[in-house]
Image: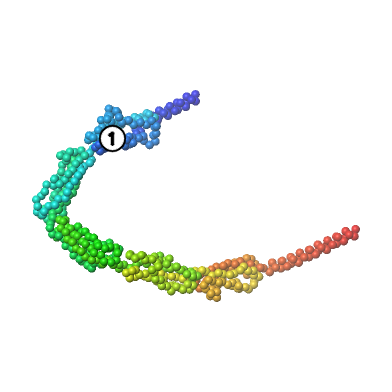
């Protein structure tokens, strides 16, 4: 009976689940159409489609199946990626566990998205006021699908002024049968025969280690071109101090050339650099020596300078508190100098040491708590150290234990503290102890007398 009831419960549950699943799709279709480039791989596209078909979150079925051939009389074999058109390939998703099937049409578009390609073209040189050329003879092109005769070529030369010398561009637009287009720019030179001019504008002296800019020393102009091709080279090393020769060639857009030669002095007018790791340094008065080179770095734009090239001047008095200066000076091979100053603070930051011991005082006694208390210091003389009672809870009228805290200040303002214990001894305690000892002695004597008496009586019997 129990087995029958269990079976009925399970059966009703299954019916309920199937009822719910019958009312909704359990599949996800991420891709319903896809593009394949002309001649592309169909298999790769089909894999992408299949990866986009899946069960919704919360559903799992090991037997989940996707079919994409011979579904609704659509076949993979009819799809040819070498023919540009749109194909329909129906896909069926099946879940045996949930007893669900669903068919969707996937549209596969074989397309041509590649524009025509320019194989070669050349810049065109036209004499000023010359005849307009046939630009179509100047360019070669092809396309992956469209035949050359069917490619439309448009030439826009509206930016070319055939009556004015200069550099221009014509715009080629190539369009295949599917509307893919390529824009190609080609140069047109309207030439002249006048060469540029090269003029020296300043003293020919160049700072070594910096970038040489020809425009800093020479003005190169052309009668028509705003910019000309400038070429130059050196005889000698522009990266070393000395004299070098420069040879300049300026070529305009028409091929007219101008040349010039000149001598340039390469100099070093930049001083070395001294870099302080810190501008101010504090050291203890007990410091005996200091390696000043640890606090500085040196460099130069040209010479290989080191710390050994430094000249160091200082007035430091080790062991004496004060403010001192260290002056670093360095000079390169071109006599350029640099200096830097390091400020040294010699300070006493060690507090004094207080010497004080715990004490015992009679009740109501008159005692100076600073008696027998002294201090020493690493820098300040002992007699110049200020010692004072900082704090105490002493009550000399009442027996007990108390404390006293001493403060010592040296000449540099360093503070030290020391705390001792004070015991106040009461008179009543002493009397009690005295009489107690007397009573103990009396009892001891009485005990001895009784012992002797008992012993004698035993001997008498």
- Residue under the image location 62 percent in, 73 percent down: 367
Q: Nearer the viewer, residue 22 or 354?
A: 354
Decide if residue 89 is on the left or right side of residue 16: left
Count of numbered labels shown in the rendering = 1
Q: Residues within 10 Å of mark 1 (few under 14, many from 20)?
A: some
Q: Nearer the viewer, residue 232 or 328?
A: 232
Residue 315 in the image, given as x and y percentages of width and height: 43, 74
Residue 53 in the image, given as x and y percentages of width and height: 33, 35
Q: Residue furthest front?
A: 235
- Residue under the image location 84 percent in, 62 percent down: 452
Residue 454 in the image, given as x and y percentages of width and height: 85, 60
Q: Colour scheme used in the picture?
A: rainbow
Q: Is residue 127 visible?
A: yes
Q: Secondary structure beneath disc 1?
A: helix
Disc 1 target residue = 42
Residue 354 image-quadrant placement: bottom right
Residue 292 image-quadrant placement: bottom left
Q: Nearer the viewer, residue 12 or 160?
A: 160
Q: Could you tell me which quadrant the C terminus lies in?
A: bottom right
Decide if residue 363 is on the left or right side of residue 318: right
Q: Is residue 159 visible?
A: no
Q: Nearer the viewer, residue 118 or 164?
A: 118
Q: Residue furthest right?
A: 461
Residue 99 in the image, given as x and y percentages of width and height: 37, 28
- Residue under the image location 30 percent in, 29 percent down: 69
């Amino acid at each position: 009976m129990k087995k029958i009831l269990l079976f009925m419960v399970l059966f009703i549950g299954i019916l309920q689940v199937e009822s719910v699943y019958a009312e909704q799709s359990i599949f996800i279709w991420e891709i319903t159409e896809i593009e394949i480039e002309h001649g592309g791989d169909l298999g790769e596209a089909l894999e992408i489609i299949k990866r986009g078909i899946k069960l919704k979150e919360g559903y799992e079925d090991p037997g989940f199946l996707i079919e994409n051939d011979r579904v609704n009389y659509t076949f993979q074999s009819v799809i040819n990626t070498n023919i540009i058109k749109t194909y329909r390939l129906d896909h069926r998703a099946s879940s045996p566990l949930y007893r669900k099937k669903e068919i969707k049409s996937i549209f596969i578009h074989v397309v041509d998205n590649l524009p025509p390609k320019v194989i070669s073209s050349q810049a065109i040189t036209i004499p000023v006021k010359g005849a307009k050329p046939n630009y179509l003879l100047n360019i070669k092109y092809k396309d992956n699908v469209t035949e050359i005769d069917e490619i439309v070529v448009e030439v826009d030369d509206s930016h070319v002024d055939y009556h004015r010398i200069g550099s221009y561009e014509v715009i080629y637009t190539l369009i295949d049968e599917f509307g893919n287009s390529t824009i190609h720019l080609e140069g047109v030179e309207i030439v002249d025969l006048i060469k540029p001019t090269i003029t020296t504008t300043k003293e020919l002296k160049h700072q070594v280690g910096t970038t040489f800019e020809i425009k800093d020393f020479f003005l190169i102009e052309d009668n028509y071109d705003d910019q000309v091709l400038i070429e130059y080279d050196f005889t000698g090393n522009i990266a070393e101090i000395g004299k070098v020769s420069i040879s300049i060639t300026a070529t305009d857009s028409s091929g007219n050339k101008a040349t010039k030669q000149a001598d340039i002095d390469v100099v070093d007018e930049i001083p070395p650099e001294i870099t302080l790791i810190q501008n101010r340094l504090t050291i203890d008065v007990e410091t005996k020596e200091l390696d000043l080179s640890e606090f500085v770095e040196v460099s130069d734009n040209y010479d290989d300078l080191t710390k050994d090239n430094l000249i160091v001047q200082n007035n430091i008095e080790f062991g004496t508190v004060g403010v001192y200066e260290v002056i670093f000076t360095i000079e390169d091979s071109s006599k350029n100098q640099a200096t830097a100053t390091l400020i040294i603070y010699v300070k006493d930051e060690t507090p004094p040491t207080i010497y004080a011991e715990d004490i015992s005082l009679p009740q109501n006694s008159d005692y100076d708590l600073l008696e027998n208390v002294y201090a020493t210091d690493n820098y300040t003389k002992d007699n110049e150290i200020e010692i004072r009672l900082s704090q105490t809870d002493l009550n000399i009228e009442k027996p007990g234990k108390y404390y006293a805290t001493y403060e010592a200040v040296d000449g540099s303002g360093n503070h030290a503290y020391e705390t001792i214990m004070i015991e106040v001894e009461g008179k009543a305690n002493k009397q009690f102890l005295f009489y107690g000892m007397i009573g103990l002695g009396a009892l001891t004597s009485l005990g001895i007398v009784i012992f002797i008496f008992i012993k004698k009586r035993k001997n008498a019997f």
